[in-house]
Amino acid sequence: MIKLLQLGFFFVLISSFAQNNEENFLITENINKFKIPDSLQNQTYKSLKTRFHKHSNSFEKANLYSKSYIKKSLIAKDSIEMARGYFLLSSISHDSLIISYLDRAIDLSKNFHSKYYPALLYYSKGDYYFENANYKEALDNYFISYNMTKDNNPVLAYDSKFNIGSLKNRVGKYKEAQKIFKEYYDYILSEESKYPKDYYNELIALFALSDSYTRLKKLDTATTINQKGIKISLLNNDKDMYHYFIMNEGVNLYFQKKYKSSIDSLKKAIPNIIKLGDQSNIMFSRLYLGKAYYELNKVKKAVKQYKKVDSLFSDYKDFFPEIREGYKSLIDFYKNNGDKENQLFYLNRLIFVDSIYNINYKYINDKIIKNYDTPNLILEKQRLIKKLNRSNSFKNKGILYLLIVLVILSIFLINNYRTKKIYRKKFERLIDTDNKQENEFINKKKQDFTYLSEDITQKIKIGLEKFKSNNDYLNPHVSISTLAKKMDSNSKYLSLFINHYEQKKFTNYINDLRIEYAMEKIKNDKKFRKYTIKAIAYETGFSNPVSFSQAFYKKTGLKPSYFIKQLESSSKSKKQP
């Protein structure tokens, strides 16, 4: 059984290894053989940094600019600029190289105590460890960043302290965390605040405060804060933060024992959180959805949610103490149903969860109350193994089942990785390519087109240019007959023209123009980017979101939700200094 589980992890490691094949730019040989391209030889540090951020979605280009930045500073023997170069390189790297580059940057800037360096580097290390569920290292690095910036960079200091509060909140130190969140909230609303004067940071503070009030069982206060957050989100058309507050209120309703209302809120929030790819809060919301179902004695629905949490935890390894409750419920469920195979499987999972707790949480938290101690779990595991060994046929079926599951899981992981890689390349090509068609006569066929006279061809050409420049294709009621009539022509001539010169049918021609318009609006208009897929579809002339999504995928090879998500992610990374 254990070997089969290890086999599954082996496949995961193979998948991960495929992502980590980039060149290590700390090795002297790699640095020496790198040559700055002639086109970049005379570029300033500022220019290279600007180009890096502009092309941060293209690994090859961003990699070239960051390495040119480092090589230029190495030649000039400028340690602080070299540190900045390694910071840029770390932001596009994978796995252990991120920490290696950040450590090198810290070493280069350790004697240069500025507003950002080396404090920003420690903060970035903290973020890396936080995202990878290594909370011990995350806490250490956030503390270093805070101590370096508390007197000269209040924004970075408060960001570091806020993340320290988030870690404290995770392990049950709710009062300590709440104190930090209140300080953060008071500061961003104060006159001396150095944060941008917008609504977003206020919502982040309110979100953290509402959660801490729920944990402290001050449920009415938490509801008041959630309502305020919902109101601000709606005023600013921020659907993402709106759903986060709906999620928080769903958890708050659970503690108020209003289980049906809790389920309604959580089910409303979860699809949007899934769309954002926020694995931690997907796990959190599904866990409480399962707990609410369990309280209503809808055990099978609860088990379904707990199993989804386990599936997410297998990939993401993010952990919060309440997750143990889901595993305990799964163990009890399969025990009551006489399913020893699954009972043993989730006992192993719970033991693994406790090992993560031992690595991380004991460093942060003094103690945690456990109803199921790990030694007892191990004893229970041994008893189950003895029972399973009494029935060879049952054991063989279990092994075969697990083997099939592991093979399917491995195939899924590999295919999922390949799909993500393909989607990422498609996205980068779309961003690097100007998708607007030139308003010139597109002659894809060299031979003469004898079906239409030169006068008719010229009339249709001018009419289509005017049609495109006025964005008339956004009219949902446009048709080939109405357009031809507007050009003082007929639909047959117009159809022949578009089929020949555009190499597509009229419907596809209109849909492509709409998608090109939508892509430009999404890229350049932040407010438009916040619209729902349904709203974007109507704004661009489609009759429903399904036809819009199908046309978008046909044109780009990507789903519109993925395209928007990647743009949002790129926009956030560019804001970092």
Image (tube, rainbow, N blue to C red):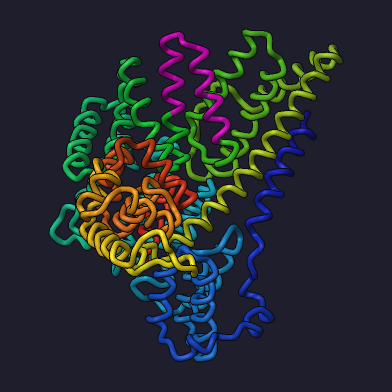
Question: Which residue is located at x 29 percent, y 31 percent?
Answer: 246
Residue 15 image position (x, y, % from top left):
67, 49
Nearer the observer, 571 or 317:
571
Q: Give the range drawn in magenta.
A: 286-312
506 sits to left or right of 193: right
In the rendered image, the quadrant that contains the C terminus is bottom left
Residue 207 appears in view:
no
Farthest left residue in view: 191
Question: Which residue is located at x 20 percent, y 52 percent?
Answer: 486
Residue 318 image position (x, y, % from top left):
52, 40
Nearer the observer, 281 or 164:
281
Question: Which residue is located at x 40 percent, y 69 percent?
Answer: 53
238 sits to left or right of 16: left
Image vertical order of residue 266 relative to residue 473, above or below: above
In the rendered image, the quadrant that contains the N terminus is top right
Residue 168 image position (x, y, % from top left):
41, 42
Image vertical order of residue 500 relative to residue 385, above or below: below
Residue 160 on the magenta segment: no
Nearer the observer, 372 or 566:
566
Q: Residue 569, located in which quarter of the rendered image?
A: bottom left
- Dominant SS in magenta: helix
138 sits to left or right of 528: right
What is the count of numbered marks?
A: 0
Nearer the observer, 153 or 312:
312
31 sits to left or right of 466: right
Residue 220 appears in view:
yes
Residue 47 image position (x, y, % from top left):
39, 81
Q: Residue 123, located in which quarter of the rendered image?
A: bottom left
